[in-house]
């Protein structure tokens, strides 16, 4: 069964192509259009998926039910959104390049179930508790599922849900907007800001919760945060944006914890699959091991990843998940020797090699890499990327060294997709990858990794005795990650940093 999964129409459009359970391609539309968080499909991504495969899909699977979403938009007074937008068939026709792609059967699925399937059907579990937390789907904002396989087919039973307008994701986005950042885009910056905030006084925090929450255990809120935080002098008590960020993170972690506690009680499994955009909050994820023993966060848990989830629901069976290197391919061997030379000479180098990562985080194939030991490295890399100086960077480390250098949280013996943070045991030795709160968003690289980043780290540790590098996404400010060699050339010209392929 050949299935083209699609997520498009709101933000972060993407597609996934599967052939009898093999994930042939999965990628982000934005990396072809160069428009960050692009909601639209384009001919280039469709062509890349179809031309480089040896088959044509026989079914299209769409990640949500459009008319159910329209009903919520009408309820929310989003009349412009209600009356705009193409049908799924027209959406496909516009990018089908003269083919009959738009004439294929189209199946639509529940938004949160697509999230759930993208996680469960790529996980190693035969059964699991699946938690989905995002800003908003059609109506659901939080859902808890029991998932299992029955005669080889994936089965899902939703055991609890919370609906719009009560939303942890929208609450966090409202705080993002309150400190002058862009909601549904820069929540990750708010998370980084939180580490700089002062401790929150218990009385202030109690007042804040009383102002915002109706019942925190049922996740019912007193306001619709879709339109932002209501005006209130209480926010002035926190005195600075970093303190607001800290209290937002603390509140989000408490609410997520309530969801996980409820999920553990409702589903008889110690296996957790966690999906939805809120699952990208790696600072909150460090607490997941308090509730579950085994944890799987698919590396693209947001809406783009649900293109794979929709395809998985149409396929019905477990997918053959290997890793996240599923996008556009820059052919040729990974340039290990050249990267080593640049790192030793200049301390910083870019790499664009092999297949692009499926997900928002660079994992070694579209990365800006640096020696993590230099005192000036963090500032240099932030300057190259035109970022705020308070922003942290992640380490990529050989898996077998992870526990020697980091206190990995419960449930995360490894972290191949940067899903959690961990305390660095030697922060003074690696200032470039340790945040102000002492944590690092760790990427571990196992011996079975198909990216050349494994060979690079093996060579690097022999040369230097250091088993890790700083790893951040290779992108021009305001644009998505580098995709093609031409994108890499532009990066070199603009920023004066070599990018090897």
Image (tube, rainbow, N blue to C red):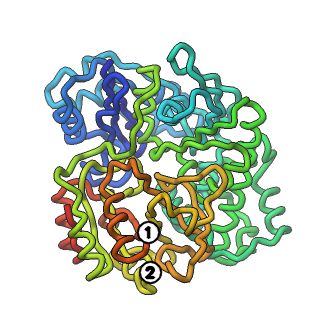
Query: In this rendering, is residue 192 above or below 455?
Result: below
State the residue in front, 205 or 298.
298
Residue at position x 43%, y 74% in the image:
466
Residue at position x 50%, y 17% in the image:
152
Among the two numbered marks 1 and 2 on one chain, the one whose residue lies closer to the N terminus: 2
State the residue in front, 65 or 322.
322
Outermost residue on the front side: it is 462
State the residue in front, 406 or 248.
406
439 relative to 257 in the view: left or right = left
Relative image position of residue 171 (x, y in whole percent): 64, 53
Residue at position x 27%, y 54% in the image:
34
Outermost residue on the top side: it is 151
* Residue located beneath label 2 in the image: 373
Q: CA distance from mark 1 to mark 2?
A: 11 Å
* Residue located beneath label 1 in the image: 467
Outermost residue on the bottom side: it is 375
């Amino acid at each position: 069964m050949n299935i083209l999964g699609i997520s498009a129409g709101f933000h972060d459009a993407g597609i996934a192509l599967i052939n009898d359970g093999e994930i042939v391609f999965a990628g982000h539309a934005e990396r072809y259009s160069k428009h960050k968080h692009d909601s639209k499909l384009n001919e280039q991504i469709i062509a890349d998926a179809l031309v480089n495969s040896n088959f044509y899909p026989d079914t299209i699977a769409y990640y949500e039910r459009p008319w159910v979403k329209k009903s919520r938009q009408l309820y929310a007074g989003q009349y412009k959104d209600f009356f705009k937008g193409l049908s799924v068939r027209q959406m496909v026709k516009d990018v089908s390049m003269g083919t009959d792609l738009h004439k294929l059967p189209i199946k639509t699925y529940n938004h949160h179930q697509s999230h759930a399937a993208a996680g469960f059907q790529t996980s190693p579990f035969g059964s699991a508790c699946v938690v989905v937390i995002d800003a908003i789907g059609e109506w659901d904002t939080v859902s808890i599922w029991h998932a299992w396989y029955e005669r080889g087919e994936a089965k899902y039973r939703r055991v609890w849900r919370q609906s719009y307008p009560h939303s942890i994701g929208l609450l966090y986005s409202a705080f993002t907007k309150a400190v002058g950042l862009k909601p549904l885009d820069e929540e990750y910056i708010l998370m980084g800001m939180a580490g700089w905030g002062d401790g929150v006084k218990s009385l202030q925090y109690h007042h804040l919760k009383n102002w915002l929450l109706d019942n925190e255990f049922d996740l019912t809120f007193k306001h619709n945060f879709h339109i932002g935080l209501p005006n209130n002098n209480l926010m002035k008590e926190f005195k600075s944006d970093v303190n607001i960020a800290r209290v937002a993170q603390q509140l989000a972690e408490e609410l997520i914890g309530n969801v996980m506690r409820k999920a553990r009680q409702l589903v008889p499994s110690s296996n957790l699959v966690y999906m939805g955009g809120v699952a990208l909050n790696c600072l909150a994820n460090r607490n997941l091991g308090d509730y579950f023993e085994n944890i799987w966060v698919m590396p693209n848990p947001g809406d783009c990843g649900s293109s794979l989830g929709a395809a998985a629901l149409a396929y019905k069976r477990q997918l053959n998940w290997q890793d996240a290197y599923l996008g556009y391919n820059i052919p040729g061997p990974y340039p290990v020797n050249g990267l080593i030379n640049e790192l030793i000479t200049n301390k910083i180098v870019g790499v664009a090699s092999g297949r692009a990562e499926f997900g928002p985080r660079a994992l070694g194939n579209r990365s800006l890499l640096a020696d993590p030991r230099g005192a000036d490295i963090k500032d240099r890399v932030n300057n190259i990327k035109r970022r705020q100086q308070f922003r942290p960077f992640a380490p990529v480390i050989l898996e077998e060294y992870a526990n020697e250098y980091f206190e990995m949280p419960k449930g995360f013996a490894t972290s191949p997709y940067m899903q959690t943070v961990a305390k660095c045991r030697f922060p003074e030795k690696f200032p470039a990858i340790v945040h102000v709160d002492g944590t690092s968003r760790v990427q571990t690289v196992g011996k079975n990794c198909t990216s050349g980043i494994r060979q690079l780290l093996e060579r690097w540790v022999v040369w230097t005795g250091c088993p890790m590098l700083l790893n951040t996404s290779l992108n021009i400010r305001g644009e998505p990650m580098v995709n093609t060699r031409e994108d890499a050339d532009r990066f070199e010209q603009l920023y004066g940093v070599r990018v090897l392929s």
